[in-house]
Amino acid sequence: MFPHLVFVGARPEIIGKLLGVPVTLTAIVRTGTDETFERKLALRTFSTDVTDVDALLACAREIHAWRPIDAMIAATEHALLPTAIVGEALGVRVNPVEAVTLAQDKAAMRRRLAERGVETIAHRVCTDVEEVREFLDTCPGGVLLKPADGNGGRGVALVRTPDDIPNAWAHTAPESRTAGVLAEEFLTGLETSVETMSAGGRHRALIVPAKHTSGPPHFVEIAHQMPGEHPPEVVKTATEAVFAALDAIGYMWGPTNTEVMIDGDRATVVEINPRWGGARYWEMLELVVGVDMAEATALAYAYDRLPAPFDVPAATCAVRLLTPPPGRIVAITGLDEATAVDGVVRIGELNRVGDVMPSLTDFRGRAGYVLATGPDRRAAADIAEHAASLIDMRTIPAASNAKDDASMRDDVRQTLSKLLPGVRSDLDALIRIPSVSADPAHAADVRRSAELTARLLKEAGAADVEILDDIEGGRPAVVAHFPAPPDMPTVLLYAHHDVQPTGDPGGWTSPPFEPEERDGRLFARGSADDKAGIAAHLAVLRFFGGRPPVGVTVFVEGEEEIGSPTLGAFLERHRDKLTADVCVLADSTNLDVGTPSLTTTLRGMTDVIVEVRALEHSVHSGIYGGATPDALTALCRLLATLHDDEGRVAVEGLVSAPAPAVDYPEERFRAEAGLLDGVRLLGDGTVAERIWTKPALTVLAIDATPVAKASNTLTATARAKVSLRLAPGEDAPAAQRKLIEHLRDRAPWGVEVEVTAGKAGRPYAVDTTGPAFEAARSAYGLAYGGDLVHVGIGGTIPFIAEFADAFPDAAILVTSAGSDPDCRAHGLDESLHLGDFENACLAQVLLLIELARQNDKNQPARAI
């Protein structure tokens, strides 16, 4: 039978290494960890608190009773001492408690080394700064403070003068556990380490690497190379010192990483770390000397076997640790460029978006690593350094280390607030261009608007920007790309740069194309519809420095206000340029100021021109009136048949749909619509149903003699333009045919009726299930400080249905860039609520962050 080994606290990548090793494996994992992988590979898997001796002992006894244990191996630092205690209690093979204790207690370890005649460092355990001051007087080269227990990756601070002591003490003391603060003589010379494996008290040196630190005052390791290419005498001196130290503390089994200072022929052991190295170390060892450390550890415990010595390294490897600026990580980009560098083996142990990085004062300031190989140590180091430089971990100032969503929001808002004045300036510049797509006289302005939009996106860091106007009859559109990091989705951010005509300029309080801020609103044509959408997208891209955490395609259309007549052809031709997983359409409205809203239903639209002919020519109303119908009266009578007495649309066969469940009081609607007292609402049902999910019919215009030019004449012909809004689920061409049939069938007095079909835009209902909508609910709810509500919109946005057809798998989020019911889009004194505009910018930033975090959580663990 194979020896029965119990691995305590083993991670999945360690267990995976033991597949095929001739041992019977049982795993004890930490309570609360996902043990699916371990269960597949271990004979049995148990779960307990691996740091609690009593809990671990109870678990081990249960295992021992089921199948006798031959050896227990701690595979995580926090389980080292509990495992040693439990193993000795059971009488199984385990590293002695004394050895583990001495390795973890630096002061005790130094005393033991001195007792056994092994070179050590002058040191003192200090309880206050005065004791540090006294010890410094005996060490003219300086003093290094560190916690007296644990490994050397935290709490290290150099003291050269008495003035350094307060800050150094403040850094080290909080990291010290029960053993106090260790002050030791600061040694100069070559700092390195020796990787060893022990079996039955015999030791084998595997390699002596080279390491590099951040330097004083904290000496954080930031790079390693294997082999170290040290002179043979350095390797020999270091190895002998390490073996002597291991013998002195009674270390018997498994791996160590022992740090040594070399000064001439003097080698001083600084730390003994009986732990699992650091994944990057173990991987380098396997690549360079061919030793799988997990397998070697199992064989040492199970068979008292040491790895075979090696003479020539199989490879030369280097690691560069990633050290981003301190702050909250909001984007990680450049991984694809880094992984493409020839010689890169792995990029591992990355922190995630949302994590808060401290200053580089200890190992917690490192955010991952790049492992590379090359023809020699210098080349491998250069490759790792170059690849690391391509990885951009964008951070923003963080008010705290908290990872909760509210802390993330507050940090993002603070950083975003510094960018918004510049965004507002660019929004004003966009507004000043009268890009009225419906007026041929403004064709040059529409072009200028597209050019400015393209320039702003290029300045925001787009990899490429195009102005596309290659569809006959179309207006210039802008498409910009920000490539997706590996395994991340692409989000399409939509807006349009064309605007409606202004109507009578004299009806505006301020000039329509000169933005003016009043009472927290920005008044101008296009401020809300939809140049705010462009500005919101710019704010997001500038926040990320042009390198968002997900892919972004920006599509800014130039003909939305005339019904997007060439959009279908545009999508067909440029499909590959617009492919996305999520589409954010910032061209809708919020239910109210401060209420984030997701538009889930949109009505479609169709229109016709109906012309009535009653006479060959106009005639005198006095001579012919009373017997001769006139076209205008007949037209009025015909138009009156479009509604019943309650104001319901009377065209037969039109569809209605259920409305989103939202409270929309009639009193509020009357106030927002400006209804006069006594005027009744049309139709029936809730307000939401009437304006969002039922058909609506409007006479938009009538061609007739104006009152000022009226004469006593019976009109020969008259015509009107009729618009029909369509409920979600309606077929737009079919509805248009029904309207035409209605008008033709109800011609009064036998007059001739000719109906000319106009444009048609399909209605749309959004499926709000799936992870993108979960991300939106989180992001917009956080940004606005209230739940995201679902609303409908009575208007039509043809782009949505067109895009849904072109990209059926994309999630479509119809949002507001700050528009609200009082924005008066298309009307006089259009305005943008600036507070909600800021919230919309914040929400979009949080949405991209949440999509990145969401996607990252769904990725499998990185191989180590």
Image (cartoon, rainbow, N blue to C red):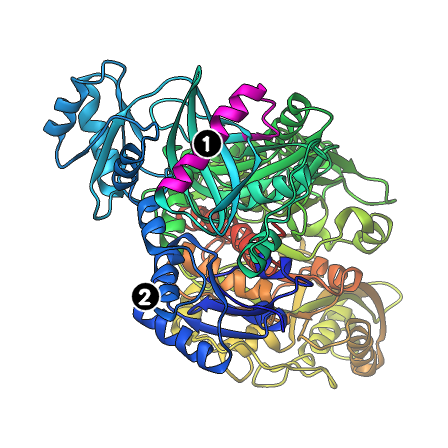
Q: Residue 221 carries which label?
A: 1
Quick one: 405 or 639, which is closer to the camera?
A: 405
Give the left or right position of residue 51, taking residue 604 as reference: left
Q: Residues within 10 Å of mark 2 (few under 14, many from 20)?
A: some
Give the left or right position of residue 275, taking residue 476 as reference: left
Q: Earlier in the sequence, mark 1 or mark 2?
A: 2
- Residue 725 lies, in percent from the top left, at 67, 70
Which residue corresponds to the image point at 39% horizontal and 37% vertical from the top-left?
A: 245
Q: Give the CA distance from mark 1 to mark 2.
A: 30 Å
- Residue 169 lies, in percent from the top left, at 20, 32
Q: Which marked residue is nearer to the observer: mark 1 or mark 2?
A: 2
Quick one: 428 or 515, which is closer to the camera?
A: 428
Quick one: 804 or 442, which is closer to the camera?
A: 804
- Residue 321 lies, in percent from the top left, at 53, 35
Magenta span includes 234: yes
Rendered image quadrant of residue 25: bottom right
Q: What element carries label 1?
A: strand
Rendered image quadrant of residue 617: bottom right
Asked if 667 appears above or below 136 in the picture, the reply is below
Q: What residue type is labelled 2?
A: Asp
Instruction: Identify the magenta region.
Output: 224-248
- Residue 575 lies, in percent from the top left, at 82, 51
| Residue 516 appears in the figure | no
